[in-house]
């Protein structure tokens, strides 16, 4: 009799056990490694235009995997990252050696703080060691949470699991002891009901379903209108990786209007033909589309010639005015009620293209990297510091009108001014 | 508790999740009349919409349209033929005569963005696309430090940027006339510095 009861109770506890497990493990997935994440943001924004994102191949700058091992003195490495010209001039042998790797001098980053550099270096280590490489799944996995298999998180999960188990065993023991005590005193207990008729369990299940179902419903509703990961098939297989990555063409060569106006221009066919009049065959690394099919680059260039009306055998007879526009499919769509201006961000704010568009130089087919949601905009406006050094050549003289902030900085009341402080959160800045 | 309630909640969740964007579709818009502009926005498919209502639209400005930023000082009307090319040598840089200072930092930026890819950041005709012949671009770009380029009149350079020359295409769509003159001034300022000291170009090749 007792034996039978025990089994029944264990069965009754099962849903509870599952719920408890769910809550004990859930936080593990929510937590990333904040430091590495900060490093990643900084790396993509500041370093990746020259240093390859896989940390293994050389780009404009050398591959950075294991860079900390190559520099004996950590202080000097920090100095190098902040101002390499100065370190070379000082004659530090390692700096002189590194300066000869590439003909292009490295950009200086005087604004980086020590913790920021450490964050970048820890991201480089993590990336180079392959820890961050999530298993390549299909479409859903690509946009999902980056599973950071950090040791700490695994330990945390195991400990939570054990604690939850211990707690459940104790509850179970306690429950049985109480029952035994009651039976000994001949107190009548209600006969236990099967799970599906027990109102307590039904209520718990309903609440759980409400929370989980509500979470997914809300998440789904929020994603209406948002097009993150949108990656349409374009009329020509144009690889940004080949153009902006391997061949180092400046983003502004084709999208020069990002410097001048609201819209970053989609280049007209004549801009393509500036180079492709001469480059008629593709000889670079093998191209693959999203499904892994090999793409013939030379055939794609011929598609361009069909639009341009260009005959490679009669190059001199080409009439650019006969060219037809290529109807590229627009990837980044903002709602009509949002105003966004590229020049304000690229030219005035000095924001790198990669900050919002991701690792464009590594994309064969471009997809929407950022959410482009209001929360995403506002978050960046809260965090981004405005260059208030109006006296230096890098600062924007316009900011000299913010007298109060300049006085506060001088008085030490504030150390930096964010976009938020100069009106970056006002509704009318973007909605009017 | 009604089982239909649960089913409805789950179904709603699935449907709502399906409204988001996928790889190939941009997803659904909530209130499309607030999402898609009624006015013709840049790069919106205006042509097809205008064709539907039978309006004429070819994406080109009306003949004789003058850009709002167009400055008469930069007026340029030489024809794209050999006579025009010959006349271009006598063109003077309006930025020199107007007494205006040229923002060399901006000029350098324009050069690096638009020209450096072929002509090289060091103006030595060896940009990343050419890479001494290893790059994808097979034609050797002009080395601005060569004697013939140093001797070339600024007006001729302006003419070549406007109409293109040899394998080089026209940069009229990428650079305004003012910007073209700034780039010419930048190239001239860099090569003029190199010209008197004959060793300067040799130095730049020695470091390679």
Image (cartoon, coloured by chain):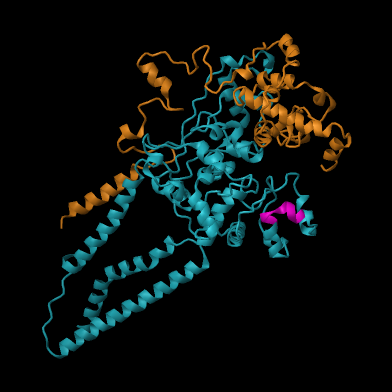
Q: Which residue is drawn at 28% across and 70% down?
A: A16
Residue extent of the magenta highlight: A80-88
For chain B, give the colour.
Answer: orange
Q: Kindly indicate the quadrant of the structure image that contains residue A323.
A: top right
Q: In this view, does A176 lie to the left or right of B147?
A: left
Asked if the magenta segment contains residue A87, the reply would be yes
> How far from the left and from the top, in percent, is residue B86?
76, 12
Residue A418 visible at all: yes
Q: In this view, does A103 lie to the left or right of A221?
A: right
Which image quarter holds the N terminus of chain B?
Answer: bottom left
Q: Nearer the viewer, residue A90 or A27?
A: A90
Please tell me whether residue B126 is drawn above or below residue A1 in the rendered image. above
- x and y percentages locating residue A288 in the rendered image: 57, 39
**Within the image, what quadrant is residue A25 found in?**
bottom left
Name, please, the residue furthest toward the right: B198
Q: In which quarter of the image is the C terminus of chain B?
A: top right
**Is residue A134 visible to us here?**
no
Compared across the picture, whether A31 is left or right of A280 comes to left
The colour with which the image depicts chain A is: cyan
**Where does the image place residue A137, in percent across and percent down from the top left?**
48, 50
């Amino acid at each position: 009799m007792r034996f039978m009861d025990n089994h029944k109770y264990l069965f009754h506890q099962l849903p509870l056990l599952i719920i408890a497990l769910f809550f004990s493990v859930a936080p593990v997935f929510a937590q990333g490694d904040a430091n590495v994440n900060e490093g990643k943001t900084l790396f993509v924004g500041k370093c990746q235009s020259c240093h390859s994102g896989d940390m293994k191949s050389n780009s404009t700058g050398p591959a950075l995997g294991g860079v900390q091992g190559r520099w004996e003195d950590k202080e000097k490495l920090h100095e190098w990252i902040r101002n390499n010209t100065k370190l070379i001039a000082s004659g530090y042998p390692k700096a002189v050696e590194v300066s000869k790797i590439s003909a292009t001098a490295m950009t200086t980053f005087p604004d980086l703080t020590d913790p920021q550099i450490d964050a970048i270096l820890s991201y480089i280590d993590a990336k180079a060691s392959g820890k961050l490489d999530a298993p390549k799944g299909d479409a859903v996995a690509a946009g999902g949470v980056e599973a950071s298999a950090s040791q700490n998180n695994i330990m945390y999960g195991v400990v939570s699991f054990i604690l939850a188990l211990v707690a459940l065993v104790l509850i179970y023991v306690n429950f049985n002891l109480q029952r035994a005590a009651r039976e000994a005193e001949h107190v009548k207990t209600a006969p236990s009901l099967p799970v599906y008729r027990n109102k307590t369990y039904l209520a718990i299940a309903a609440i759980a379903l409400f929370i989980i179902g509500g979470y997914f419903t809300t998440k789904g509703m929020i994603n209406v209108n948002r097009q993150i990961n949108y990656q349409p098939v374009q009329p020509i297989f144009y690889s940004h990786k080949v153009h902006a990555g391997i061949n180092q063409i400046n983003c502004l060569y084709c999208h020069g209007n990002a410097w001048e106006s609201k819209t970053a221009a989609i280049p007209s066919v004549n801009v393509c033909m500036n180079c492709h009049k001469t480059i008629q065959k593709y000889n670079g690394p093998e191209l693959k589309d999203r499904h892994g099919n090999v793409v013939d680059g030379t055939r794609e260039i011929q598609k361009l010639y069909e639009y341009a009306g260009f005959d490679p055998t009669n190059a001199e007879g080409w009439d650019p005015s006969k060219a037809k526009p290529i109807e590229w499919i627009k990837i980044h769509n903002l709602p009509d009620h949002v105003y966004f201006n590229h020049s304000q961000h690229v030219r005035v704010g000095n924001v790198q293209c990669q900050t919002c568009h991701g690792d464009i130089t590594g994309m064969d087919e471009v997809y929407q990297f950022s959410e482009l949601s209001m929360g995403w905009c506002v978050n960046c406006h809260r965090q981004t510091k405005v260059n208030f050094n109006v006296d230096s050549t890098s600062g924007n003289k316009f900011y000299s009108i913010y007298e109060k902030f300049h006085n506060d900085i001088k008085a030490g009341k504030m150390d930096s001014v964010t976009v938020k402080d100069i009106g970056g959160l006002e509704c009318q800045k973007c909605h009017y | 508790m009604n089982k239909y309630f649960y089913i409805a909640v789950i179904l709603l969740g699935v449907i709502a999740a399906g409204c988001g964007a996928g790889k190939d579709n941009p997803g659904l818009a909530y209130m499309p009349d607030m999402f898609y502009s009624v006015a013709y926005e840049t790069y919106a498919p205006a042509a097809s919409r205008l064709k539907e209502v039978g309006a004429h639209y070819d994406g080109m400005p009306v003949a004789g349209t003058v850009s709002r930023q167009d400055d008469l000082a930069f007026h340029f009307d030489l024809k794209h033929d050999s006579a025009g090319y010959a006349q271009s040598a006598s063109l003077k840089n309006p930025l020199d005569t107007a007494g205006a200072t040229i923002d060399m930092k901006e000029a350098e930026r324009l050069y690096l963005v638009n020209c450096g890819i072929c002509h090289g950041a060091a103006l030595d005709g060896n940009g990343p696309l050419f890479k001494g012949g290893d790059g994808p671009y097979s034609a050797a770009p002009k080395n601005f430090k060569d004697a013939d380029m140093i001797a070339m009149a600024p007006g001729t350079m302006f003419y070549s940027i406007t109409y293109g020359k040899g394998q080089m295409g026209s940069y009229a769509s990428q650079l305004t006339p003012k910007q073209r003159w700034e780039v010419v001034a930048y190239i001239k300022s860099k090569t003029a510095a190199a010209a008197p000291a004959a060793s300067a170009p040799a130095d730049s090749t020695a470091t390679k």
